[in-house]
Image (tube, rainbow, N blue to C red):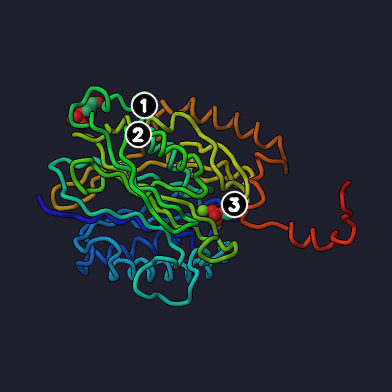
Amino acid sequence: MSEITLSVIKADVGGFVGHTDVHPALRDCCDEQLAQAKKDGLIVDYARGEVGDDISLIMTHHKGVENEDIHKFAWNTFTAMTEVAKKYGQYGAGQDLLVDAFSGNLKGMGPGFAEMTFEQRVSEPIVIFLADKTEPGAWNFPIYKMFADPFNTIGLVIDPSMHDGFRFEVQDLIGEREIIFNLPEEMYDLLVFIGSPSRYVIKHIYRKSSDEPVAVTSTQRLFLMAGRYIGKDDPVMVVRCQSGLPAVGEVLEPFSFPHAVAGWMRGSHHGPLMPVGFEDDTPSRFDGPPRVVALGFQLTDEGHLVGPRDMFGDKSFDNARQLALDAADYFRRHGPFEPHRLPLGEMEYTTMPQVSKKLKSRFKKAD
Ligand code: 13P
Ligand code: 13P
Ligand code: MG
Ligand code: MG
């Protein structure tokens, strides 16, 4: 068995129409670039992923994580797609490309990425989740359930190779620090942090017996990086499955509950995260509700991607979708009120400073 790196790199480089979908011309441009990279030997294999107005480059290669060549290729691809987006007048063309030129790797430059290098197993089932109108912390709830909740993942109870639990790496997006928790022993400590998904985000899951990652998320928060609202941080997540890891069905199961996430409409509202098939990945109502697609792959032993299968296309997620639609109605009826609207500190843009300034002289000291 040889080591392989799986990189999922995503960006919104223009929406069709508004923030709802991607124009076919952008897809064509993306496919051309990916095919060329494979021909040039830069990558072993690829697939294109999509949710809402976000496109993901899914690539296998032998260059490791945060590799300059791979990140530069992704940057150049998104730049080429931006030119196409401009030609077709796409909304927010180049939205996620925050800097003028590439330097070194994509950290802080706008595109989101989740990558891991691992020893490929004879059969390597992988699920790649892509979400739109939300933030990286949206994965905290489902990934916790996959790797720590026995009511979700019975393998934690009855599979001897999972019974010891997993290690969770959590990043503090504001404090710019990270910590590793051992589960199940430190479950309550972990939950204190990851219950605040706008700040604490699960970045990696590791087996307890090795440093090999078994799951990874993208943790970029564009508004923190840019210091102002430019684009949101619609996240991706990669999860390896089976043989000592959660089964594919255990990895999908958390999404049977469309939990509330931040990021709907103008990046400033909570709403349910609705699992959808590829056909339904176009957030329209109030630019949402937020949604997630799941791409299933089997990797062959040379790093070739067999797939994707549309994992949420299955009717067993219909009830989750119905619940999400009902929850969307419930949230929407709050209009501009919290908890539909995010708290002041978390909104991606707000008129509060201007309105406060205008009314400053009219505020009197309260008794
Ligand atoms: P593995 O331990 O081979 O992954 O089998 C678990 C399983 O798929 C049961 O549903
Ligand atoms: P995107 O982050 O998907 O571009 O959505 C922006 C937005 O605010 C939609 O209401
Ligand atoms: Mg957009
Ligand atoms: Mg988006």
Label 3 C-beta lies within 8 Å of the nearest ligand 2 atom: yes
- x then y, percent, for residue 333: 71, 35
Within 10 Å of the Cα at label 1, are there few (<14), some (14-19), or many (20+) other Cα atoms?
A: many
| Residue 133 visible in the displayed image | yes
Please report whichever mark, 2 or 3, sits nearer to the chain's N-terminal start. 2
In the structure shown, which secondary structural element does the residue marked by tag 2 occupy? helix
Q: CA distance from mark 3 to mark 1?
A: 30 Å
- What amino acid is labelled 2 in the image? Met
- What amino acid is labelled 1 in the image? Asn
- In front of the other: label 3 or label 1? 1
Which residue matches tag 2? Answer: 146
Image position of 27 (left or right of 270):
left
Image position of 42 (left or right of 51):
left
In the structure shown, which secondary structural element does the residue marked by tag 3 occupy? helix
Which residue matches tag 1? Answer: 152
CB under 8 Å between discs 2 and 1: yes
Please report whichever mark, 2 or 1, sits nearer to the chain's N-terminal start. 2
- In front of the other: label 2 or label 3? 2
Which of the two residues, 76 or 349, is positioned nearer the viewer here?
349
- x then y, percent, for residue 330: 65, 31
- x then y, percent, for residue 185: 32, 33
